[in-house]
Amino acid sequence: MALNMAFLQLPEVYNLIHHSDRGIQYCSMAYTNLLSKKSIRISMTQNGDPNENAMAERLNGILKQELLKKKYQSYQEAKTEIDIAVKIYNEKRPHLSCDLLTPERAHAESGILKRHWKKEKEIITE
């Protein structure tokens, strides 16, 4: 139902990729057929592990947390805001997972990048 509601808001011209994990609802023939009929490309993690496609998952999280709190007046306005967010994510925002570099800079580097996030506390059992 949610997918059909989203289709009602699609502009005449669009070029979309639908990214998801391998949840049963997203892999169903009915769901994938709906996407295919609208010429929407399907992107899924290989094994259903969100860490497998960390960049897409992280960017989706940023979009949900930072951009979807606002109601946009048009598709073009939303697209412009998303383009800006992606540019910031790739070119301006340093990431703890890639030695405090931006993804753009990290991809230009060679060798292993140091990760700067804190490890979860070890659980000690007695």
Image (tube, rainbow, N blue to C red):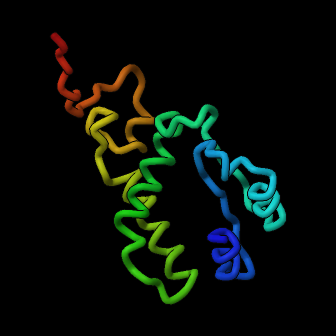
Residue 111 drawn at (x, y percent): 39, 20
Front position in the image: 119 or 73: 119
12 relative position to 119: left or right:
right
Residue 35 drawn at (x, y percent): 76, 61
Front position in the image: 29 or 50: 29
Front position in the image: 95 or 72: 72
Task: Determine whether 9 is above or below 85 in the image.
Answer: below
In the picture, which quadrant includes the N terminus?
bottom right
Q: Quarter of the image holding residue 37?
A: bottom right
Residue 105 drawn at (x, y percent): 38, 40
119 relative position to 104: left or right:
left
Task: Determine whether 32 is above or below 79 in the image.
Answer: above
Residue 50 drawn at (x, y percent): 50, 40
What residue is drawn where x is 52% and y is 35%?
A: 49
What residue is drawn where x is 66% and y is 68%?
A: 3
In the picture, which quadrant includes the C terminus?
top left
